[in-house]
Image: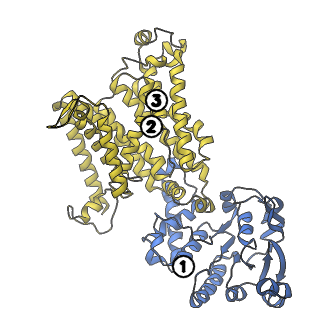
Amino acid sequence: MMLETQGATMRFGGLVAVADLKLEIDANEIVGLIGPNGAGKTTAFNMITGVYEPTEGRIRFQGKDITGKPAHSITEAGIARTFQNIRLFSTMSVLENVLVGSTVQERPNWITSVLGTPGYRKRTKEVRDFAMDLLEETGLAEFADEQATSLPYGKQRRLEIARALASRPSLLLLDEPAAGMNPQESIELMDFIHHVRERFGLSILLIEHHMQVVMGVCSRMYVLDYGVTIAHGTPDTIRLDPKVIEAYLGVD
Amino acid sequence: MKTRDTILNLGGLAVLVLLLWWADGHLGNYAMRILNLSAIYIVLALSLNLANGFTGLFSLGCAGFMAVGAYVSAILTMSPDIKEMNFFLEPLAPWLQGLTLPFGIALIAGGVCAAIAGLIVGLPVLRLRDDYLAIATLGFSEIIRVVITNLQGLTNGAQGLKSIPKYSTTWVVWGVALLAVLFMSRLVRSSYGRQLKAVRDDEIAAEAMGVNVFRVKVVSFTLSSFMAGVGGAMLGHMITTIDPKMFSFMLTFNILLIVVLGGNGSISGSVIASIGVTVLMEAMRFLDEPLNFLFVKTDGLPGLRMVVFSALLMIVVIFRQRGLMGDRELSWESLARTGLLPRSRNGGLA
């Protein structure tokens, strides 16, 4: 079991944003998390990645309890994420953005950084080579020295994924990777997500609104509505589930 | 070509040394003092730029940490006789009375004590952001000053310290300034420097990428305090007298002015602005004296200089928000691009 949330609940005052969430993700699996706006999908992400500490319940990752750990230790443990509203480092180049993603691999400290010790230089080289491989893999190598925020939107999304991969995660969380993409780009993205899973052998949990993308890419999915998990199963069962249809389309 | 830059770096260093050697012999005391003051301001501006420009911590505590450095280094280097002369109201703590250390050790001790003060202040305060952080650091800087004023038996209180040994020679201050520039330029271009910038650009993303944001902030703030302490100590050993009033907010303001004028996040900007502002500050001293324009006569308005600097700051903020250099750096490569130097094939930074 890669990730398991055991009844994770997030309350903000009187509002229950996510109630009793029970996600289970196996190794090498692509799982979708869908639901209407405000259903609590991003909140679920934030609980898993340590941005919020769940009010109740536990989160286990590769058998270890990671509930309430700070976000950077969770990244170190092997969970990386992208953001719904792109959060690239705006003053840095494309390559530098990916290099920041390697922080948990490199673990730089200021003394060896300033002195440029052989060990430090060896590690920077390894990390840089890996970052260049990632850029190659994501088709961004030719933009390596350009400012990250000068890239077109679709490429910025790819860069966020490359940056997340730089920490060599075992679980990748993608928050609406296809947001703002046209149908052609969405199809490319589906292929890309499959490719990433094969290439790096990781599990992926993704939030997505584009039904075409989710149905095409995920082996299983969970549906949230008002913080409650109303359905889970394979894309085919979800498609026919009356509760899901009700949540999305409304039923008289 | 890396070799070109190495040659140019060594050449630049040689020119600087020659220039200082010439200046030391030929310029008068007054001019030398301005020159050396510039070097001290370079250290201080880089200290503030590390926290403010590279890590995005809006800190206004500079003067407090300078005071710690200045007092520690001064007390550690004064001879027992001078200490006795200074502490006439209440004697100095006995364990310090006989203690006289070499300047180098005292200077580092000043920096270390300032760094410890920075660590103690930083641990609670760095949980705040932006203007809250600015207010809190400003408050702590004032607290340090008030504590110094009231620790009669340790700091001689409001009387301050006089006859501090004049150890801040041209070579010392410029040597330290050069070290500071070297340290900063290596730091900000390293992997650790990238973490600092990541924290500055987007804390949430940095944390999600595995950067321990709080620890990075504490390290940056502590290093910045160390540099402020060393700068403060050198200032004390240059003007040979210090008192708590010297380390008021005005001092922090001067340094902030340099950092903003030079460019937040630019080492070369800080260096250029340090020299420029220090020289201008002296050149415009006539403004504080009685003035006689044809129709307007003033009989000495102390502080008119600062009005000019405030106006300058305002103009920069309106027309050139990012300062002289923005966050760019002056390098041999950028000189080459202007055509002053032959271009290299693969660019390297100076």
Separation (CA) of disc 1 from disc 3: 52 Å
Q: How is the image coloured?
A: by chain
Disc 1 chain ID: A
Q: Which residue is mark 2?
A: B228
Separation (CA) of disc 3 from disc 2: 9 Å
Residue B189: numbered disc:
none
Q: Is residue B5 left or right of residue A18?
A: left
Q: Residues within 10 Å of mark 2 (few under 14, many from 20)?
A: many
B258 is higher (above) or lower (below) than B246 = below
Q: Between A227 and B346, which is closer to the camera in this rendering?
A: A227
Q: Is residue A221 left or right of residue B219?
A: right
Disc 2 chain ID: B
Circle 2: element type: helix
**Which picture quadrant has residue A243?**
bottom right
Q: Which residue is mark 1?
A: A138
Q: Between A208 and A115, which is closer to the camera in this rendering?
A: A208
Residue type, label 3: Ala
Furthest residue toward left: B294
Residue type, label 2: Ala
In the rendering, at what x and y percent does residue B250 appear? 41, 35
Q: Quadrant of the C terminus of chain B?
A: bottom left
Circle 3: element type: helix
Q: Which residue is mark 3?
A: B67
Q: Quadrant of the N terminus of chain B?
A: bottom left
Q: Are labels 1 and 3 on one chain?
A: no
Q: Nearer the viewer, mark 1 or mark 2?
A: 2
- Say whether disc 3 or disc 2 marks the residue closer to the N-terminus: 3
Q: Nearer the viewer, mark 1 or mark 3?
A: 3
In the rendering, at what x and y percent does residue B236 appear? 38, 26
Which chain is painted in yellow?
B
In the rendered image of the structure, the colour used to display chain A is: blue
Circles 1 and 2: CB atoms closer than 8 Å: no
